[in-house]
Amino acid sequence: MQGFIDQAVAFIGANAAWAGPIILVFAFGESFAVISLLLPATAVLVAAGTLIQAGTLSPWNVIPWAIAGAVLGDAISYWIGVWLKDRTERIWPFTRYPRMLRTGRDFFTRYGGISVFLGRFLGPIRAVIPLVAGMMGMRQGPFQVANVASGIVWAPVWVGIGWFAGEALKRIFGIEDAAPVLIILIVVATLVGAAAAFRLVTRKSKSPHEDRPDRS
């Protein structure tokens, strides 16, 4: 994963014209149902922030495309939820890990429409909240307002973190190219966090009765 992200960042650093479409694909993947567990677009956005700080990229090469990808990923996940409704429970990976949907439903039930905004920033919840919102009949207008608003906040936050981190590494440690350092740190943190969260979700997938052998 790290090598793949390294190559993507190196490519957009050398080919600014392609930065936007590539970042859109990453942001879309991180916002699309389930795939977001596997594709850490945040690492690419932070690295892009360091490239902006270094003058290699313009914010216009990054932020609007990241917002568009994030909004599109959530919107399509929502429409899939509207279309499938309860049938979602009968497709992989939810047949294998039903706790993923239950966690999303619990979160949505507790926080309502604001969960769409909050879910953008919350690990495994991000992977299912738009899908659950569609399944549970959230009206499209409020959903899209929360979707767009969260995308507008999410993209500049991660790009800004990359910019400030790049500036700090340059001033404190004299590191001119901060992107590789940050990619390693973010990818490792993302993968460890995702693995821990996924393990927590899947460990709770079984009820105590399911753990007992069938004595009939």
Image (cartoon, rainbow, N blue to C red):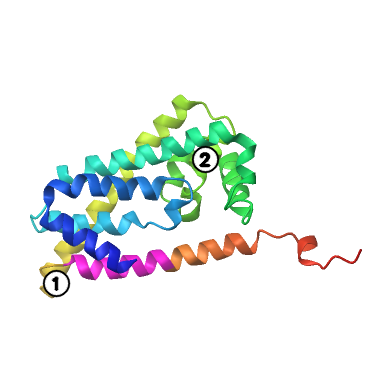
Q: Is residue 203 left or right of residue 36?
A: right
Q: Is residue 73 above or below residue 100?
A: above
Q: Which residue is mark 2?
A: 131
Q: Amino acid at mark 2?
A: Leu
- Which quadrant holds residue 213? bottom right
Mark 1 Cα within 10 Å, few/some/many (few <14, many 20+)?
A: few
Q: Position of residue 26 (x, y in %)?
A: 31, 50
Q: Is residue 91 left or right of residue 185?
A: right
Regarding mark 2 in the picture, which secondary structure is present there? Answer: helix
Q: Which mark is residue 82?
A: none
Q: Is residue 205 left or right of residue 59?
A: right
Q: Which residue is mark 1?
A: 172
Q: Nearer the viewer, residue 88 or 175?
A: 88
Magenta range is 178-191
Question: Residue at the spot x=74%, y=59% of the render?
Answer: 207
Q: Position of residue 30 (x, y in %)?
A: 38, 50
Q: Nearer the viewer, residue 46 or 211?
A: 211
Secondary structure predominantly adopted by residues drawn in magenta: helix
Q: Is residue 58 visible?
A: no
- Which quadrant holds residue 97? bottom right
Q: Quadrant of the C terminus?
A: bottom right
Question: Residue at the spot x=66%, y=58% of the render?
Answer: 205
Q: Amino acid at mark 1?
A: Ile
Q: Earlier in the sequence, mark 1 or mark 2?
A: 2
Task: For marks 1 and 2, give the CA distance.
Answer: 43 Å
